[in-house]
């Protein structure tokens, strides 16, 4: 499916987000963070998507992401890190998730590194709000 990036309400889109403003890409899913605690732990659907920021997960980066991070992150997440899955990181685990993502970004290929850095920046916003991070992969 072809989707354009959705820009967060605060306009902060990170490295890959800046590249996505002007073009479409094929995505395999999205990473969601709620704007407030009231929506923490909820799966965004239809009308309530306005209560979440999201970061697209590019199809081309899913397999490299899964190969380098699924083992490390599975210990911190609820749900199975796999295609056609929803998995999430409770607010208490978001800082640890960010540390793992940043550590892997150091040695990742440039395209994946850019997305991992954007993911870490995105997840930091969740940590500041004391909310979790949810991946919805299709």
Image (cartoon, rainbow, N blue to C red):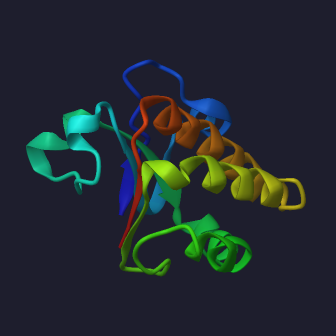
Q: Position of residue 25 (x, y in %)?
A: 50, 53
- Based on the displayed image, in which of its 4 quarters is residue 80 positioned? bottom left
- Based on the displayed image, in which of its 4 quarters is residue 110 positioned? bottom right
Q: Position of residue 12 (x, y in %)?
A: 53, 23
Tell me: 49 left or right of 6.
Answer: left
Q: Relative to 43, is 4 above or below?
A: above
- Asked if residue 137 shows in the view, the reply is yes
Q: Position of residue 127 (x, y in %)?
A: 51, 37
Q: Where is residue 134 in the image (x, y as percent from the top left)?
A: 39, 56
In the picture as drawn, the residue positioned furthest to the right comes out as 107
Q: Relative to 32, is 125 above or below?
A: above
Who is closer to the viewer here, 99 or 46?
Answer: 99
Q: Relative to 121, is 114 above or below?
A: below
- Asked if residue 18 shows in the view, the reply is no
Tell me: 95 left or right of 25.
Answer: right
In the picture as drawn, the residue positioned furthest to the front comes out as 92
Number of numbered markers: 0
Q: In which quarter of the image is the N terminus?
A: bottom left
In the picture as drawn, the residue positioned furthest to the top comes out as 10
Tell me: 136 left or right of 76.
Answer: left
Who is closer to the viewer here, 4 or 34?
Answer: 34
Q: Quadrant of the C terminus?
A: bottom left
Q: Residue at (55%, 38%) from the top-left corner? A: 122
Q: Residue at (43%, 56%) from the top-left corner? A: 90
Q: Residue at (80%, 61%) from the top-left corner? A: 104
């Amino acid at each position: 499916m072809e989707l354009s990036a959705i820009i967060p309400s605060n306009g902060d889109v990170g490295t890959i987000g800046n590249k996505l403003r002007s073009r479409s890409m094929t995505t395999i899913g999205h990473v969601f963070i709620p704007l407030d605690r009231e929506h923490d732990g909820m799966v965004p659907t239809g009308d309530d998507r306005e209560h979440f920021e999201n970061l697209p997960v590019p199809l081309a980066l899913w397999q490299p992401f899964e190969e380098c991070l699924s083992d490390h992150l599975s210990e911190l997440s609820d749900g199975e890190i796999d295609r056609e899955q929803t998995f999430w990181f409770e607010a208490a685990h978001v800082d640890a998730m960010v540390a793992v993502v940043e550590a892997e970004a150091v040695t990742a290929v440039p395209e994946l590194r850019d997305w991992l850095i954007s993911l870490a920046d995105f997840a930091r916003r969740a940590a500041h709000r004391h909310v979790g991070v949810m991946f919805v992969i299709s």
